[in-house]
Amino acid sequence: MAVMVSSSLAQEAVGAKQYLLEAKAAFDAIASYHCTATNVVMKYGLLRPTRYFNTVQYSFQKPNRVRMTWLAPGLLKGQVAVYKDSALAVKMRFMPFAIKMNPEGLLAQDPAGNRIHKTHIGYLLDTLLEAITPETRVAIVDNSKFQSVQPGMPVEVVNDEGRVLVLLDRARKLPISMEFYGPDGRLKQACYFEDLKLDVVFGAEEFDIATKSS
């Protein structure tokens, strides 16, 4: 009986991982996308947790061009960041021009350490798939495990570093959301992708931003 249970779990893991591989294949098949992306980061101090969040209009074009226009929080609304040709430029809402930043510098990351050129769906899927080992548990789970309950194919990846909940669009196969939890079960970070449009034909100005020297 134990062998039968083990075999069943193994088949479930293979099936669940296949959904993630299909998600990556779906991403590989597109040239660009646009969405409204929300990123939530949780930090746990001695007294109470601190919640950081950003909501942006997110444009991505292969091989790795990114434009983010902030919608929230209010203090950042209107800020624009563009990553193109390994260079990053950021325009604060109160400045008439953008400033160049080191994309690997301290100022070019959020509280979780995310960098603009490592935020697109393909990078997130690659990172998740690379972390799966023979000891990793990959399973199809119930939607109720998610912070934000939406229809989709829910996949859970669990290892020593915690667990990741991925909700996949059943038709497009791409992620709707990804939630990252620590070994203690507490939410560390969550990414939500809304109004996803694929193979968008962007104008040349989408990834151009005027800097002081240009």
Image (cartoon, rainbow, N blue to C red):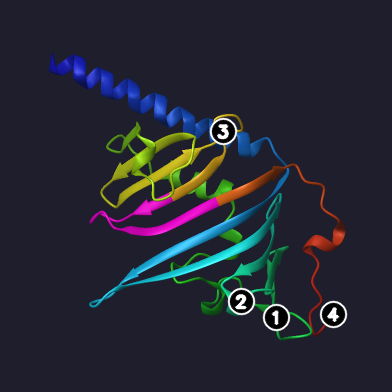
Of labels 4 and 2, earlier in sequence is 2
Amino acid on which the number 3 mark rests in the picture: Lys
Q: Of the two numbered discs 4 and 3 on the same chain, state the one appearing first in sequence.
A: 3
Crowding near pointer 3: few (<14 within 10 Å), some, many (20+)?
Answer: many
Compared across the picture, whether 100 is left or right of 161 comes to right
What is the CA distance from the residue labelled 1 to the residue labelled 2? 7 Å
Name which residue type carries label 4: Ser
Sort mark 2 into few (<14), some (14-19) or many (20+) by Cα contacts within 10 Å: some
Q: Which mark is residue 76?
A: 2
Left or right: 110, with 16 as reference point: right
SS class, disc 2: helix
Instruction: Measure the C-alpha gap from mark 1 to mark 4.
Output: 18 Å
The x, y position of residue 140, in whole percent, is: 37, 31
Mark 1 highlights which residue? Answer: 93
Above or below 144: residue 57 = below
Q: Residue at x 61, y 61 (%)?
A: 117
Check contact, mark 4 vs mark 3: CB within 8 A.
no
On screen, 107 above or below 29? below
Instruction: Work out which residue is located at the far left of the displayed protein and give it.
Output: 1
The label shown at residue 214 is 4
Mark 4–mark 3 distance (CA, rounded to whole Å):
41 Å
Which sits earlier in the primary sequence, circle 1 or circle 4? 1
Contact between marks 1 and 2 (CB within 8 A): the answer is yes
Tell me the CA gap for discs 3 and 2: 32 Å
Q: Give the alpha-carbon distance from disc 4 to disc 2, as whole Å.
A: 24 Å
Type of amino acid at the residue the image marks with label 1: Arg
Tell me where the magenta segment starts and ends, as one range.
179-192
Q: Residues within 10 Å of mark 1 (few under 14, many from 20)?
A: some
Label 4: state its secondary structure: loop
Look at the image and tell me in which quarter the C terminus lies.
bottom right
Residue under label 3, please give it.
173
The three-letter code of the residue at mark 2 reads Leu
